[in-house]
Amino acid sequence: MDPVSPGVVRELIARHGFRIKKSLGQNFLIDGNIIRKIVDAVEPGPADTVVEIGPGLGALTRSLATKAGQVLAVEIDRNLIPVLEETMAGLDNVHIVESDALKTDFDNLVKSSTSDAGVFKYKIAANLPYYITTPLIMHLLEKHSSINRIVVMVQEEVARRITARPDTPEYGALTVAVNFYAHTEIVFRVPRTVFIPRPEVDSAVVRLQVRDTPVPMKDKNIFFALVRAAFQQRRKTLLNAVGGTDKRLTKEMWLSVFQQADIEPGRRGETLSLVEFARLADAYADASADLPKINS
């Protein structure tokens, strides 16, 4: 039973007595063309493992299974498990996992599901509700080393923020954080009309191609601290926004930091590229290296 058509979706929900949970952002995709385009963006091959987060009724899962070697469908709602067991019947390469994605170690999950003892890579596919989008994407990027591609459907506004360019209204700390780990692009937009129930906003599918190595820098923690400071006070110049993050440095020392980084201190954080933030972080790391430790 392929849960793509509205009639099949409604029949499955009714027969299993399933109640759609708005708190979990459950909106089921009912457009086969959109599903095919998502699969094309994932590009699963017969040797690939794809982890699908939030499979819902299994419409995308079934399509992924026709091309991937293995699909691990991670679902938090235990009431959906019986539905998935029905819609995945006969697909030997699909394994349903009941788990909270924010608490899941996906590297270990995939490693335990394969007999390959060597280096392994896998792909992520997900339709993410708004409330979990940012924490889950950062959970995947920060805590997993074996993911090579993430294809996620998110609210269109969030997609624009993830893929924004410097000196645009959407560009912010989320943009810099995600692009630190991955190359980002909006693959296509998805109208709200292709879901049951219909969400209040349109969505977009974003592809994150994880970098083989993140942008080089001396101290990642310093980098992210400066990024947060720069965007917490967007209207302030960089000198005023980040200058208060470390009282050990005088204004003259901060000006020297900006000079070493070749960045004008009167600029705002939203104008800096990823590479410029890295240069600023390295210059600050050099300037503060020999100073007494904070709270020492």
Image (cartoon, rainbow, N blue to C red):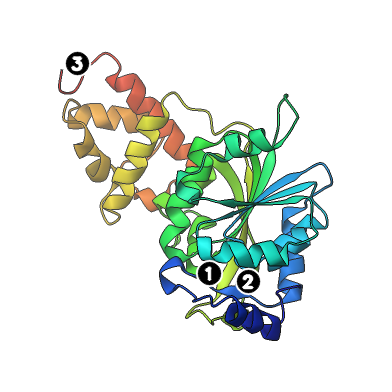
Instruction: Residue under label 1, please give it.
Output: 156
Which amino acid is tagged 1? Glu
SS category of the residue bearing label 2: strand
Tell me if residue 154 comes above or below residue 191 in the rendering: above
Circle 3 Cα neighbour tier, 10 Å, few/some/many (<14 / 14–19 / ≥20): few
Q: Is residue 266 visible?
A: no
Instruction: Residue under label 3, please give it.
Output: 292
Tell me if residue 201 comes above or below residue 161 in the rendering: below
* Between marks 1 and 3 in the image, the one whose residue lies nearer the viewer: 1
Q: Is residue 170 visible?
A: yes
Which amino acid is tagged 3? Pro
Circle 2 Cα neighbour tier, 10 Å, few/some/many (<14 / 14–19 / ≥20): some
Circle 1 Cα neighbour tier, 10 Å, few/some/many (<14 / 14–19 / ≥20): many
The answer to which of marks 1 and 3 sits earlier in the sequence is 1
Instruction: Residue under label 2, please give it.
Output: 189
Which percent across, then down, holds residue 54? 57, 60
**Does residue 2 appear to the left or right of 278 in the view shown?**
right
Which amino acid is tagged 2? Arg
Quadrant where the image shows the N terminus: bottom right
SS category of the residue bearing label 3: loop
